[in-house]
Image: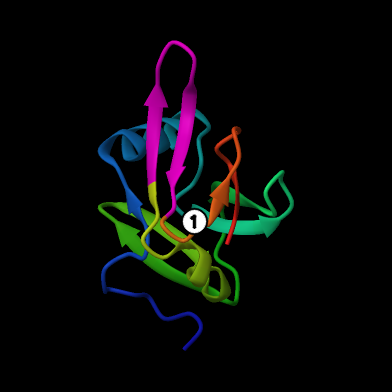
Amino acid sequence: MANQTMHSPAPVKLTPGALNALRRIREDQGISDEHGLRIGVKGGGCSGFSYILGFDRKQENDQEFFVEDLKVFMQRSHGIYLLGMEIDWVEGLNNRGFSFNNPNASDTCGCGTSFSA
């Protein structure tokens, strides 16, 4: 069951801007179709946790789902921290990169990639 592909709604949302940026990165770096987008958390960062976002191969404890045509991997244990999160791509004068809007975060820091739950 650990390798089951989910066809239910994705636990996280990727905005059209984020999807376009991720497709561009995948193409520019020649990342193969074997790889999916890994979304997760790890201990550390100024608020206790920081986000994981990058292309990776599927691992044993991963859930797999699709956001449009993008294959996404997430460890089951990370769902409690990420359920309902929205990832966006921001391109402004002072800021360029992915932003994380996480309803599960009780506190965030100025860097925008660290949170506590």
User: The magenta stretch spans which residues?
Assistant: 87-102
Q: Can you identify the residue that label 1 sits on? A: 34
Residue 35 shows in this picture: no
Q: Is residue 88 left or right of residue 55?
A: left
The x, y position of residue 49, in whole percent, is 66, 54
| Outermost top residue | 93
Q: Is residue 99 above or below residue 48?
A: above
Q: Is residue 10 left or right of residue 38?
A: left
Task: Please count the marks in the image.
Answer: 1
Q: Nearer the viewer, residue 69 or 41?
A: 41
Q: Is residue 105 above or below residue 113?
A: below
| Outermost front residue | 106
The three-letter amino acid code for the residue at tag 1 is Glu
Q: Nearer the viewer, residue 103 or 84?
A: 103
88 within the magenta span = yes
Q: Nearer the viewer, residue 14 or 4?
A: 14
Within 10 Å of disc 1 (Cα), the crowding (few <14, some 14-19, many 20+) is few
Q: Main secondary structure of the magenta part?
A: strand
